[in-house]
Amino acid sequence: MNSYSIIVFGAGPSGICAAIHASNCGLSTLLVEPSSVAGGAITLAGVAVPALFNAWGRQVIAGIGWELVKNTLLEMGEKLPDFTVQDTSDHVKNAITINPLIFSAIADEALLNAKVNIAYHTMPATLDWNGSSWDVGLCTKDGLIQVQASVIIDCTGDANATKIAGYQVLSPDYCQPGTFSFHATGFQFDQIDFNDLANDFYTAIQNGTLKLEDVGDNPNWVKSFFWHFFGRQGKNTNHISWINAYSSERKTQMDIEGRASALRLFRFLKGRKGLENLTFNQIAQQTGARETRRIVGETTVTEDDYVSGRVFPDAICYSFYPIDLHDPKCGLIVKPLKPGIVPTVPRGALIPKNSTNFLAAGRIISSDRAANSALRIQATCMATGQAAGAIAALAVKLNQQPREIPIQAIHDSLRKQNAIVPSIP
Ligand SMILES: Cc1cc2nc3c(=O)[nH]c(=O)nc-3n(C[C@H](O)[C@H](O)[C@H](O)COP(=O)(O)OP(=O)(O)OC[C@H]3O[C@@H](n4cnc5c(N)ncnc54)[C@H](O)[C@@H]3O)c2cc1C
């Protein structure tokens, strides 16, 4: 039976950084991913826009995630962003658009250089603590295999490993919507009759050929939706609501509904004036879920903690983004942070309550709904992933529980791999 010091589940922004950091600390690390590619939502959901590495004129997140994004930009011959310049009118404008294919190949290269063992096309079936290590059943193409690990890191985006291990997760019935992104081309913007589209839309809703979610849920948006839709070339526009897609069954439902929504809209638009040659091209393999399950951690980051920029005594990284809640009932709620505020993330939000040798990172960290709507952003996921990798590596080396490791040791490990850590007063 293969034995690893650390197993990371999920090769999204958090999992890649967790695995590279842990492996660079000299510990045997296995990265398990059910799809065929690293990147998570960046590659699977077509959301290749990592936000945000900077706040108020300085870089606040660096380390492994930033290196991957920087190397992707350099590979493409693109300019690096100037972090001393901040567009304060809209934080979101500071997000960085990257090429997802090059990002995923650069991530593969970085994982292999760090000597991470990569298991694509694999996912966890069982996780049992045997008193000294984790017995792990992995589902592979050829059936179940058994491996062992000292520490587990859950970076699945849906807290699947945490649930399988028997720890508490929070699973709201009412979630932010998912989005199935695609790329609309072949249209002539100045020929499109937007009034006509908006009027016909209401009839199409009444006769059932379109659903409100095809234009993002909010009936008040319909007039402006089609400008928005063609302006963004179809990317990140629909809202697939009312499905908490944490399980295989629910993800299947959400993926089918995402594609059905694209097809309904395509049938509605194709052949109209200016849309005779309309095409929808694939940029996402999955409907991207903004929110599913989170762990119930030793510390839960609240909206108040986040917007006040609370510096937790066990802060392991910064985060920077507005509260950004896509609410199917009330529309988009965006609350920019006040000038100078840079929130922090505590180690306690990465540790499931009452857990042994177990960590979580990425969008599933313990947080209330509003705080999570900001913490879920990719640069923060990369930073929490790297921190989880550092804590897991120290847990193995010092033979201590993740909650017992001195914060200074975690900060030292993170700094060694170029991360930025908050100063704790
Ligand atoms: C429509 C949409 C738009 C967004 N826009 C932006 C944006 O503009 N900028 C930004 O920074 N962020 C954006 N986000 C948020 C961001 O992309 C995610 O919150 C972030 O990718 C979460 O990172 P993660 O590592 O936690 O999980 P994910 O990116 O979800 O990656 C999780 C990985 O785990 C794998 N996995 C799933 N289940 C299992 C399992 N059981 N076992 C093992 N592995 C598993 C998945 O295949 C995946 O590779 C957006 C999200 C969505 C859905």
Image: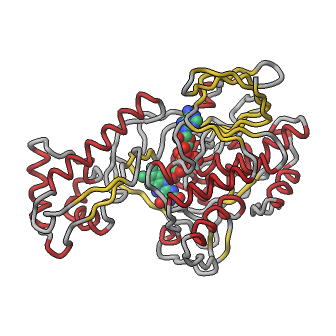
Judged left or right of residue 180, residue 348 is: right
Judged left or right of residue 96, residue 262 is: left
In the current view of this chain or complex, which residue is farthest to the front?
142
The number of numbered discs placed on residues in the rendered structure image is 0
Judged left or right of residue 135, residue 161 is: left
Could one spot residue 371 in this view of the protein?
no
**Camera-side residue of 387 and 269:** 269
Q: Say which residue appears at 21% left-offset and 45% top-offset.
A: 211
Tell me residue 25's x, y (percent).
Answer: 83, 49
Q: Quadrant of the C terminus?
A: bottom right
Q: How is the image coloured?
A: secondary structure
Could one spot residue 337 in this view of the protein?
yes
**Camera-side residue of 218 and 410:** 410
Tell me residue 18's x, y (percent).
Answer: 70, 47
Up-down: is 56 above or below 330?
Answer: below
Q: Quadrant of the N terminus?
A: top right
Q: Say which residue appears at 38% left-offset and 36% top-offset.
A: 243
- Based on the displayed image, in which of its 4 quarters is residue 273 positioned? bottom left
- Based on the displayed image, in which of its 4 quarters is residue 400 positioned? top right
Tell me residue 343's x, y (percent).
Answer: 65, 60
Q: Say which residue appears at 20% left-offset and 52% top-offset.
A: 266
Q: Say which residue appears at 32% left-offset and 43% top-offset.
A: 258
In the current view of this chain or complex, which residue is farthest to the right?
398
Tell me residue 76's x, y (percent).
Answer: 54, 71
**Camera-side residue of 374 and 226:** 226
